[in-house]
Image (spheres, rainbow, N blue to C red):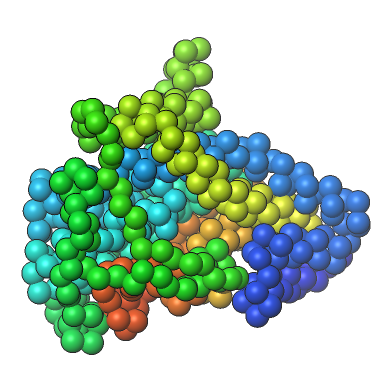
Amino acid sequence: MEDWQILTITGVAILAIVVLIIRFKVNPVLALVLGAAFLGLATGLGANTTTETIMQGFADIMFEVGLLIGWGVLMGALLNEMGAIRRLVDKLMHVFGPKGIPYALGLTIGTALQSIFLDVLLVMSAPLARRIAPRLGKYGTAKIATAMAISLECGIVLMVPGVATVALAGLLSVPLGEMLIFGLLVIIPTIVTSIFIMNFFITRGLWKIDKDQQPFEEAEEPSDGNGAQGSLAQTPRDQTTPNDDGGSGHVRVAAPAKTGVETSGREPGLFVMFAPMLLSLVLIGTGAILKMVNFSSPVMDFLSTPVISLLIGLVGTGIVARMTIGTPRVEKAIARGFSESGQILLLTGAGGSLAAIVATSGMGDILGQYFTASTVAPLVVVWAIAAVLHIAVGSVSISAITAAGILAPVAPAMGLNPVLIALAAGAGSLFLVHATSNTFWLLQSLLGQTTRGTLKSCSLGVSVASVMALGFTLVLSLFL
């Protein structure tokens, strides 16, 4: 088959996936598998090879990241149940004060809290952020909303153990420790510079208080049982919003539940709550560093293996949780974590199936012929593909995984480090978060913004972060 035919068929397959999700409201998992099947048959792979490749692609990425995603989501569910987020945000405000809190909160959410499912993290932290906003001055709502939007979205695709980050690492066979280290090198400056740029324009006329935010009405909620107050802002008790997993349905968003720790004993310190998770990340990072310097130790090789490191973090978090909130609540949190991880795993696996078909069809060899020895061209292309897909579909996970899968076969031919493709795909998938995203509507309702205001804080803010992340990835490519 001619190259132009394969390119055309691949483009039609990607377009068909987008149409199925947006126009016909087909679940993204089904749409990805249907698109992969069409691509395989249309490019002449045959029925047997197509089905075997789809299953093998699913199996390969589950082999790489299945348990990792599961451990991360379960760990986040336990931290959420313990009320760790509420205490952490209050601590950050106390330590960094009004001027530093947007940066401190952004970096914390974007890095340390990525084991927590995004919607859960947002629903738990938004009321606290709303309470903090008036202390930041005239543009407090705009600054805190922008910081949260940027950090929440960046963390999903750039930071381990963010679910899309782990999926990208598995799809491109990037060691998770390497993804963690280079992801940190990109996400930290991305969050800081993006918040700085947005705050500069917010205070210089971009934000119109009377049009971009709703009146702040204090309505103090009862104490959570440990002296901590609930949100000071009235938020809708129930709202229907587009689903972030591709806009293929609707989800019912309940108001934040109380997260106070109901114990009769002594409550552990904040560091103790997060210590197991931090230990797992340290082990993963240490393993990557030791590998870079060609040092090998059987004990460290075992402990720094991502699946073991995150398992250690999960077990440790579970022990702390049992001591803090009791076994019944731990079991409920675990059950919710399993429920949340199911769709994530299926979506990740379906993305792996599509990527496998793309590679088998010869798409990678064709694209490799059109790129020079420069690493810039393929990175910009993967960023652009992810950006276009995200604008159309509205899911950072789908757009990042699909874009990375298309360009993954180029990496070996170009001598391009696959971690750069993962970071570029993640950066592109952040571009123009808008009305098809569940996060967009949650940020609007929970932080007291109008739709116009959310377009500025979320859509524009995260788009700035998308461009900055690409820039820092290109800089990183000079050294890899």
**Residue at position x 28%, y 40% from top?**
261
- Foreground: 79 or 383? 79
Where is the N terminus found, in terms of image quarters? bottom right
**Residue at position x 25%, y 71% from top?**
234
Indicate the quadrant where residue 386 lies.
bottom right
Indicate the quadrant where residue 84 lies.
top left
Task: State left or right for residue 388 relative to residue 155.
Answer: right
**Residue at position x 80%, y 61% from top?**
37
15 lies above or below 358: below
291 lies above or below 236: above
x and y percentages locating residue 152 in the rendered image: 36, 57
Task: State left or right for residue 46 relative to residue 175.
Answer: right
Indicate the quadrant where residue 324 lies.
top left
**Residue at position x 30%, y 81% from top?**
450
x and y percentages locating residue 227 in the rendered image: 15, 46
28 lies above or below 269: below
Task: State left or right for residue 172 relative to residue 337.
Answer: right
Where is the C terminus found, in terms of image quarters? top left
Evaluate whether residue 172 shows in this view. no
What is the residue that sits farthest to the bottom in this orientation?
211
- Foreground: 248 or 351? 248
Evaluate whether residue 90 shows in this view. yes
x and y percentages locating residue 383 in the rendered image: 50, 63
x and y percentages locating residue 140 in the rendered image: 15, 69
Number of numbered discs visible in the structure rendering: 0
63 lies above or below 24: above
